Amino acid sequence: MFLNFQASWAQSGGFLGIDHKLPLDNSGIWSRDTQKAVELGSAGLLVLGALYEGSDSKLGKTYWQSIDAMVSADLTATLAKSVFKRQRPIDGNNPNAFYNNPNDKSFPSGEVTHITAIVTPFILNFKDENPMVWGLAALPAYVGMARLKSQAHWQTDVLAGLALGSGMGYLAINRSNPWSLALLPSGVSVGFKKNFN
């Protein structure tokens, strides 16, 4: 039975049968520079927001929860890439190429994991009082599509990144206190905005 499953998997597009290479497009909003701006900009805004807001308000605590989720998700994705060693679409057209080359690091998508982990605590904490927060889900959708168009990831890499980032975001909001705050001096939890009031 396992051999039959393995044979059918080898004929399909990856382990879910949905993986295929998209035509390469690195122009406009799909450019690598735009992708990096979203990744680095989101992390920068998150840190600035956390330092400004502190942890005394719901918004401030959410910033710190998102930092926890981002760091945890980024570390887990990096470890998973080293374990699975999946070939990127741009390096070949075989979504079943796992565990071959130590330089292959397609699974899961680290950038999708990163941005999903950042937005998930905001969505979960504010969805009831402000449904427009669901608009943040456009960021992981954009990053996922951009990574597919860059031929940097397969569809299942993006889905795994969404699952991992969402899971880390969910875990972060269910922790009583953000661990990232515990690593910093106690004054940081007050927030810079109190200095301006």
Image: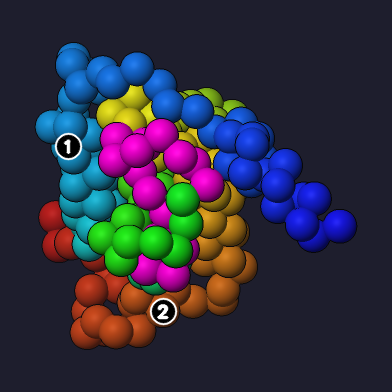
Q: Return the residue nearer the eye: 66 or 57.
A: 66
Q: How is the image coloured?
A: rainbow
Q: Quadrant of residue 127?
A: top right
Q: Position of residue 51 (x, y in %)?
A: 22, 62
Number of marks in the rendered image: 2
* Residue 168 sits inside the magenta stretch: no
Q: Which amino acid type corresponds to the residue marked 1 in the rendered image? A: Ala
Q: Quadrant of residue 36?
A: top left
- Horizontally, is 157 left or right of 7 in the view? left
At a point 25% along the width and 44% down the height, the residue shown is: 39
Task: Give whichever of discs 1 and 2 has the lower sequence position.
Answer: 1
Residue 111 showing in the rendered view: yes
Q: Distance between the Cα atoms at labels 1 and 2?
A: 27 Å
Residue 53 showing in the rendered view: no
Q: Which residue is mark 2?
A: 179
Q: Which amino acid type corresponds to the residue marked 2 in the rendered image? A: Trp
At a point 77% along the width and 57% down the height, the residue shown is: 3
Q: Which residue is mark 1?
A: 37
At a point 24% along the width and 82% down the height, the residue shown is: 184
Q: Nearer the viewer, mark 1 or mark 2?
A: 1
Locate the C terminus by quadrant: bottom left
Q: Quadrant of residue 196?
A: bottom left
Q: Position of residue 78 (x, y in %)?
A: 35, 65
Question: In the rendered structure, which segment of residues is drawn in magenta?
Answer: 81-96
Binning the other alpha carbons within 10 Å of mark 2 as few (below 14), some (14 to 19) or many (20 upward) gives some
Q: What element does badge 2 sit on? A: helix
Locate the N terminus by quadrant: bottom right
- Horizontally, is 6 left or right of 28 in the view? right
